[in-house]
Amino acid sequence: MSVAAPPALEVLGVTKRFGDVLANEDVDFRVERGRVHALLGENGAGKSTLVNIIFGLYRADSGEVRRNGEVVHLNGPRDAIDSRIGMVHQHFQLVPVLTVAENVVLGNEPTRRGVVDLDEAASVVRALAERFGLEIDPWARVEDLPIGLQQRVEILRALFREVDILILDEPTAVLTPQETTHLLGVLRGLADTGVAVVFITHKLREVMAVADDITVMRRGKVVGSAVPAETDEASLASMMVGRSVELSLERTPASPGDKVLTIVDLVVNDDRRSQSLNGINLDVRAGEVVGVAGVEGNGQRELVEAITGLRGVVSGSITLEGVEIAGMSPRQISTMGVSHIPEDREKFGLIGAHTVADNMVLNRYHQPPYSRHGIRSPGAVEDNAERLVAEFDVRPSNIGAMVATLSGGNKQKVVAAREFSHEAKVMVAAQPTRGIDIGNIEFIHRRLIEYRDAGMAILLVSAELDEVLGLADRVAVIYGGQIVAIESADGIDRDRVGRLMLSGTDN
Ligand SMILES: Nc1ncnc2c1ncn2[C@@H]1O[C@H](COP(=O)(O)OP(=O)(O)OP(=O)(O)O)[C@@H](O)[C@H]1O
Ligand SMILES: [Mg+2]
């Protein structure tokens, strides 16, 4: 009689509290060798907490973690690595000034006569990259790499240590659709070699495409499990959120008014001082959503940064209701009525060591009603925060919590709440739903349309073509730093937009 082998990883009855927050409650979770296991759940459901416990970064208050049937006590990443568990974090943990090879071997460097052997490291990395289809230049400096390649470095780091469990916390949130497809293929390949893969994502399409097993969490608990063959996106969405969710938005046509934001012949350089916008012409009218579609890295980021004052302009003009704003500071531009949901909320949108309440008035704290004659009024700051936390369903609903302790999606809700609350004339929304769960995406999309209907001019930049096509009234395709097409979203040909995005032409 044969006895079934114990699972690669088993979590039994794990509970974890942070102060008043029950982040994990009596969680059971089982991961088998050779399978991709998707972990789903709304923002703040406890997914990152659970995988951080598995990886030994957090210690559970109670419950246990078993590896191959044996209870393990991991006290940090070192132990996890010794136990052959690897993790790609929601926020990368690379050393930017080091090369790809140095980052991959960090902590386990090959040496020759006591010195780190960089040539050896590079050839090891090259071989690993080839084996797993993760091509990369071992000598490139990590800080010079686009985010999709930085993620490859993280994955290679884990694979270098020959893990047999690989955990990825929202790896596709930062990837283009092409990169995502590639990564899903890599995960499938890893599972086929016997690795147990734990994959956290908010995108149900990816789950349906790659998962063998699915576990769903809500408010700290496991609320269900499924296999793709016996479920669909709609039922996964309602399992996650606890109610049925509209997967596509019902909306009325726009009734655009005057031009509010006008961009003429805009030329902007990128970080390496080479031209990244080569004469952009674009306008956004009151009461319309203009969506910028494009493969990431074609100038979208520079366009957003130029409009919001985060990047200097080489030539050309950006006017807000006829007033030149190019060259003004981000604060001046914001005060004049341009709101901005930034792509990188950690860098531009939030201050982690400040409270939710303070972050809700960032850039505004020096103005009435938050401050009068140079004196701050904490009451007004708190009232504002209480109102927005309730309206945007930020969890936990504690306005005194430090933003750094919020889950990824709840951080994004804080930024969105603040920027929507400005009563701005223009909203520049860059990847506004990145990292956000399906219920909150629905909420933010509704908001964008409500503000549009109230007369706001909205510029939406998104790597998700579906998001652009679902929300925009006009679609501008950006390619190589130029707008190669602008057309009404009505009856637009999705395939043609895809071709324009990839080559700048539609043939
Ligand atoms: N270090 C911490 N201190 C205090 N609270 C925390 C900490 N880490 C997580 N939490 C809280 O625990 C809960 C679960 O958070 P977690 O990050 O696990 O959610 P998540 O499912 O990964 O969400 P998301 O999809 O938004 O990333 C949240 O309410 C969060 O605010
Ligand atoms: Mg998380």
Image (cartoon, rainbow, N blue to C red):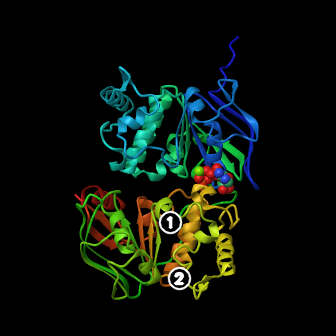
Q: Is residue 45 visible?
A: no
**What residue is disc 1 on?**
349
Residue 116 location, quadrant? top left
Does 293 sit above or below residue 88?
below
Q: Amino acid at mark 1?
A: Gly
Q: Nearer the viewer, residue 346 or 255?
A: 346
Taking the spot 30% from the left edge, 28% from the top edge, the residue there is 119
Q: Nearer the viewer, residue 413 or 210?
A: 413
The answer to whether the residue labelled 1 contacts the one labelled 2, judged by CB atoms less than 8 Å apart, is no
Outermost residue, front side: 114
Which element carries disc 1, helix, strand or loop? Answer: helix
Residue drawn at 42 percent across, 69 percent down: 460
Q: Position of residue 8 (x, y in %)?
A: 62, 27
**As drawn, is 417 to the left or to the right of 456?**
right
Q: Is residue 17 above or below residue 70?
A: below
Position of residue 433 measured from the top left corner of the image (x, y, whole percent): 51, 62
Q: What residue lies at 55% left-to-right and 30% top-to-bottom?
A: 81
Query: Which of the 4 image quarters holds residue 69?
Result: top right
Q: Position of residue 412 (x, y in %)?
A: 55, 63
* Quadrant (top left/top right/bottom left/bottom right) for the N terminus: top right
Q: Where does label 2 land, which residue?
A: 423
For the C terminus, the quadrant is bottom left
- Confirm or reject: label 2 Cβ below 8 Å from ligand 1: no
Label 2 environment density (alpha carbons within 10 Å; few <14, some 14–19, many ≥20): few
- Secondary structure beneath label 2: loop
In this view, the residue farthest toward the top is 1
Residue 261 drawn at (x, y percent): 36, 81
Under mark 2, the amino acid is Glu
The mark nearer the N terminus, 1 or 2, is 1
Q: Relative to residue 252, is residue 119 depicted above or below?
A: above
Q: CA distance from mark 1 to mark 2?
A: 18 Å
